[in-house]
Amino acid sequence: MALAAKLQLRQAQSLVMTPQLMQSIRLLQFTHAELERFIDEEIERNPLLERDGGQDDAFHGEEAAPPDGAKSETGEEGEWFRDDLDGAAKVASQFDSSLENVFPDDPGIREAIAPQLAANWKSGNPVVEGGEGFDLEDVTAAAATLRDHVAEQISFCLHQPGDRMIAVELADALDESGYLQIEFDELTNRLSVERARITAVLKTCRTFDPPGIFARDLSECLALQLARKDRFDPAMAALIANLDLLARRDFQALKKICGVAEDDLLDMLAEIKALDPKPGAAFVTSGMETIVPDVVVQPAPDGTWTVELNPASLPRVLVNQTYFAHVSGHARDAGERQFLSDCLQSANWLTRSLDQRARTILKVTSEIVRQQDAFLTSGVEHLRPLNLRMVADAIQMHESTVSRVTANKYVQTPRGLFELRYFFTASLGSAMGGEAHSAEAVRHRIRQMIEEETAAEILSDDAIVDILRKTGIDIARRTVAKYREGMSIPSSVQRRREKRALATAGR
């Protein structure tokens, strides 16, 4: 067979993930804090993007908020995009992608919820009388860290430079809980000092506040705090040395080891509970962020539920068209004009992505509220089994889209603040052939039964299974044990020991 070169024309379809499509998908699963950080980075990179701070600048941006047909705050018709690149069609052709590729099951950019979305989109930072935003964190002093607190005490309690150097090394080895994470042999070799001197300095450091720091484990931490209160007697030392028995609530063994009566043991346990197992944690100031609900659900006058986007979680981003027109008129070459054109296209794409993200969150949450109406009305006992596919089929979206929307999103309801994933629970069959039961509702029922126990009537896992089956819940014993352990509830034997001891002490 002869080999020959020839041309062939083939037509094929493939999905190309452009950076813009990937950005839109990422926006769906961003939390509120992550979205704010992402927008700040985009504003820093793109000169045509800005936040609406309520100022009337010479070059004012156009708000990337209300869709077409939505009334603005002044009552006039507003436009969603006003650019000189022939709108969304040219943006899509420039990027070789469109939002319909990101949301193939929900192609409508402008839906019936547009007026409601526009009414809930307005947000902005509070402004002071001078017109500039004011952030209290800009003028407050930074909180003292554990190392700062210890360093101040080192300067007062240790006078020799060598001792201070050792103490600083020990302070650097403290973790966030205040425990000492260093080997003495390593420190001895590194500082070329005797171990006895390090031990003496460590003894002084253990007198610092807060009590319990510089301990190497939990037993030492509790012992240091008890010694500060002059309560570290032999009986208490025996109790601290057997914390594993305390965790198992084996009070009979503890009474024998400590050589005390039951009343004295309960008093000792009360003292242990009053101690701080992590004394350094009070100085940890990072890693905690305030949860901002993405959606607010409130009862409506007609007995239904009103689902609204939280204005505080919706960024108000502007595309500065006036600045673009001014700067593009003074562009010196084709490179500068292309840069400005790319910035405008990117800014318009971002605003469209933010709008579609908000619409999708509202649509998914509305369906969840419709499915879980009984929970909002009557409580967790009426939580229905629900999965991602049920919501996706109801709103005609892909299951992966619903998964991204519900990840790390929160809804404020009359019953409290919940993550959207909370409403998706497994299904347990009915013992009487009725409707299935939610796993979360069953866990709540198990917790209630255990809380209502008395010292004379402790429910075993088998007894809980019998009670649940009588109420129509088909559940296995191993499932009850798994739910109980997941809620950190001890076994029936451990609960019986604890409640009997408490009942004896209360007589």
Image (cartoon, helix red, strand yellow):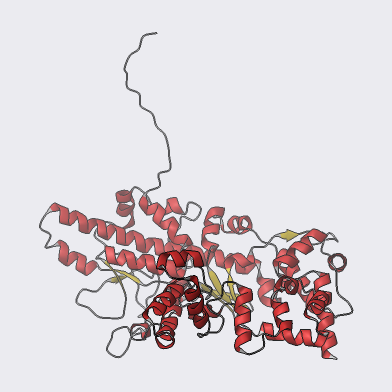
In front here: 31 or 357?
31
Placement of the C terminus among the 4 image quadrants: bottom right
Q: Residue at x 60, y 84 (%)?
A: 225
**Percent of width and height locating residue 200:** 50, 79
Q: Position of residue 498 (x, y in %)?
A: 80, 78
Q: Is residue 31 above or below residue 279?
A: above
In the rendered structure, the answer to whether residue 296 lies left or right of residue 495 reads left
Quadrant of the rendered structure where residue 69 is? bottom left
Q: Residue at x 50, y 85 (%)?
A: 208
Tell me if 106 is positioned left or right of 240 in this view: left
Q: Camera-side residue: 234 or 100?
A: 234
In this picture, is 106 found above or below 155?
above
Q: Can the viewer see residue 301?
A: no
Residue 143: image location, x then y, percent = 42, 83
| Quarter occupied by residue 4 | top left
| Residue 401 percent coordinates (x, y) | 52, 56
